[in-house]
Each structure stands twice: as structure tokens, then as C-alpha cells.
Image (spheres, rainbow, N blue to C red):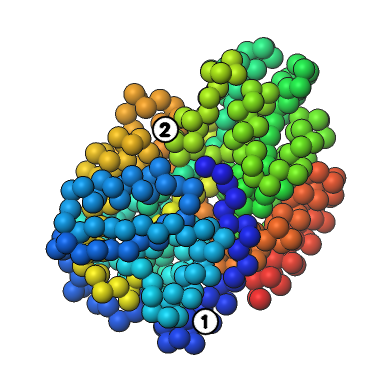
Amino acid sequence: MKRHLTTALRLTAATVVAVLAAAGCGAGTGGGSVDPGSVKAEDTGATLKLWVRPGNESVTDAVVKAYNSSHKNQVEITHVPADQYMTKFAAAAQSGSLPDILATDVVYMPQVVRTGAVLDLTSLLAADGAAGHLSPAHTEASTEGGKVYGVPYVADTSLYLYNKTLFKQAGLDPDKPPTTWKGLIAAADAITALGHGNKGFYISGDAPSTLAYDFTPLIWAQRGNVVSSSESFQFDNAPTRNALTFLQTLYRHGDIPETAKTDTGDGFFSVFASGRIGIDFAGGNGVNTAAIDAKSKGFTFGLAPIPGPDSGQIGTFSGGDVASIAASSKHVDQAWDFIDWLVSKQTQQDVYLKLPALPVRTDVQVPGSLGEQFAVPASLVPHGRVVASPAYNNVVADPQGPWLTMIRSVVFNGADPAAATRKAQAAADAASRN
């Protein structure tokens, strides 16, 4: 899975909400006029429309196929280009032509919820027993005013991949991946010292949302926050400065290849797959990491949590998609039948694990037979967090925004972390008001 996360999107949360408010679609009062208490699962042969974004078809489409093969209701999928999703959403909500079910990138759920266009699922999830057992990051992003408007559809976590073959060549224990920043730097230095084109560390350095996926865990591992409880961004703080200094050190040591500076996300997995990178901050939904053809390049690799500066600290960004029901749907009961089935423990065990794909429930055990490509990311789902802010696009996803500018200025251009975080804070505050 390539981690662009819709970096080309330019529709702000304020624009989406304003468009829908003008259309009379109760912005900020999620759920429309549908009474959740009257909703019940029905399998009556209805045709349900579902929007999904490309990139996760190996899960989204396969899950729909499993539902269609066992139900009278039939779900029809439309793949909406990621960089058009929110624009198309706003236009469809304004014209009353939303599909029955929406599968939205988790980082944009706060925007969707605030439009008032999706159904409140809180009581339904409590009644079916799923509440409290779903991916916490997806739930957080789908919650407004204590009510939950979506469920996890695709789960993904950020972690790091490490080349066990290079570890062994550098005199490092291939079965003991580093658990601190100091350990990561020492391992990266040792692998870079091997020469012959080997480099110790890799990030996609010109991909803002990919860096959100990989950089935020360094902050969260220190118990820092990226977004406050009031949904304002927090950059001017010690955890952010510490994380920037950590990556700056790796670059100064020569552990990060120069090509990383211009990588807009295409190298997220492919550079590591070359067999010349020791440690790669990336992600795993099991499917993508298991697809790396390391054998043909003559190496083996492992996965490990992204650590903080001290042992025992970890952080992870939960990516993926959230499924919600359009309050304007004429088939709300049938749409709930799909959602209810989707998040059931039985579906997670009988469908997701057999694909295989990461379960979206935290109470489903991944069998050891799937290997660490699934076990490690699955173990991180309960710890996952997400940048849940309606201003995500302005501040983080924008290639000219304060997030990418801050990281690149420090890591690659040697800027002072304190000065960079102060500047980023001012720019984030201004962008959040737009």
C-alpha cells in the first residue's frame, strides 16, 4: 500500500461543512433525521451503494465479495480516486446523491462527521457488542460529542521494517531489533559503515502524509500529543523537538540516502525491498509487508514497533478506512446489516483472517501461522492513534503546509528544531483558522 494519503486534496473542512450547511445538511449534528433507535439489520435483497478509495481493494473488495456471497442484500462498489474523495463527497451530499455506505480514509472522518451526513451508530454498536472492541484510533476519528459515526473497515499500523541479513553482516543481533532511539542510531550507523551502497535508515522525506504516518509515533511514544483535545495542532513542544533531532542525527550521520529527500511516497516499501536499507519506518496491514519479495534479493526481514527514546516506549499511527452509513440512505436497515456483519467477531475470524488481513477488532487473536507480518501490526492496533483534526488537510497533507516544511527544514536542511517548531506552530494556527 502506497502511503500518499491524498496529498493532492485541497478541499478544507470549513469548505465541506459550508457547502453542506448551504444545502441544509445539518453540519455538526451528525446523523440527520434518522432515529438510530429505529434501525434494525435487515437482509431483504436491497442493492447497496458503497464508495471506497483505491489502494485497499485487497481488503475492501474481498470483504464485500464475502458479504454478497452469503446475503440477499448486494453491495455495489464504486472506487473513488483518493484525491477526489472529499470533493465528490461534498458534491453528492449537496445534491442528495450520497451512496448508502461510505468507506473514508480515517484521517478525514472528523470532516465527514461534522457535516451531519452520516448516521449515529453509538447505540447500535453497544447493542451488538462491538463497542469497546474496535480499533481505538478509527473510533476516535469517528467520534464527535461522545457519539460514534463510523467503524473500522481496513486497519493499518505504522512500525519499522529491518533487514535481518544486514543486521547480521553488521554484527548486530538479527533477532533483537532496537527498542530505543539510541539503539536505532547505533544500528543504522553500523549498517551504513558496511558500504557498498548500504544505508542504515529510510523515510520518504517529501511525502507529508507518509511522514505523518512515520513521524507522529516518535511524538506519541514520548506521551506527547500532535493534536490537543480542542483539535488544535501542537508543534512547539519538547517531544516534537526531540523527534526532529533524532531524525536530524540520522541524516547527519549519513544513514539516510540523499534520494529520500525527494521521495514523495513511491519508495515507502520499494526502497527497503532493494535489500540495501537496514531500517525503514513504514507500515503494515500484513498484506503489503508480506508481499515484499525479499527472497529474490537474498535477505530476510523483521518488523518491530517504532520506539521512543527510552526502552518500553512505543507509538503507532493507525491508518486505513472507516465505514459509515449515509443518513440520507433509503436502505439504512440493510446498510446496518452490512456494518453489523462487518464488525462481528465471526466476520473478523472467518473473512479477514482468511484473506488474510488485519482484524479491525482488538479481541480477535491473529494465529501464529500468519507470521510476524500480521502478528506485529495486529499487536499494535490497540495502541494506535490518528491525527484527528478537521484541519488535517491544511496543516499536514498540504505539501506546502507547516508539517512538511518543519520536518524537512530540520532533518535535511539543518534548521534549529526550536526555531522550526515555533514557526510551524504559528503557521498551523493560521492554517487551522482558514
Identified at 37% across, 52% down, the residue is 153
- x%, y% of residue 308? 61, 39
Residue that mark 2 sits on: 374
Say which of 327 and 392 sits in front. Answer: 327
Asked if residue 82 lies left or right of residue 148, the reply is: right
Q: CA distance from mark 1 to mark 2?
A: 41 Å
Residue type (three-letter) at the residue carrying disc 1: Val
The answer to whether residue 116 is above or below residue 5 is below
Q: Which residue is mark 1?
A: 19
Is 228 drawn above or below residue 239 in the view shown? below
Q: Quadrant of the C terminus?
A: bottom right
For the residues carrying marks 1 and 2, which lies nearer the camera in this image? 1
Q: Is residue 281 left or right of 374 when viewed as pictured?
A: right
Q: Is residue 38 visible?
A: yes
User: Where is residue 21 shown, x and y percent of the image?
Assistant: 48, 84
Q: Residue at x 64, y 22 (%)?
A: 275
**Mark 1 Cα within 10 Å, few/some/many (few <14, many 20+)?**
some
- Which residue shows up at 71% across the image and 58% down it? 399
Asked which quadrant contains residue 193, the reply is top right
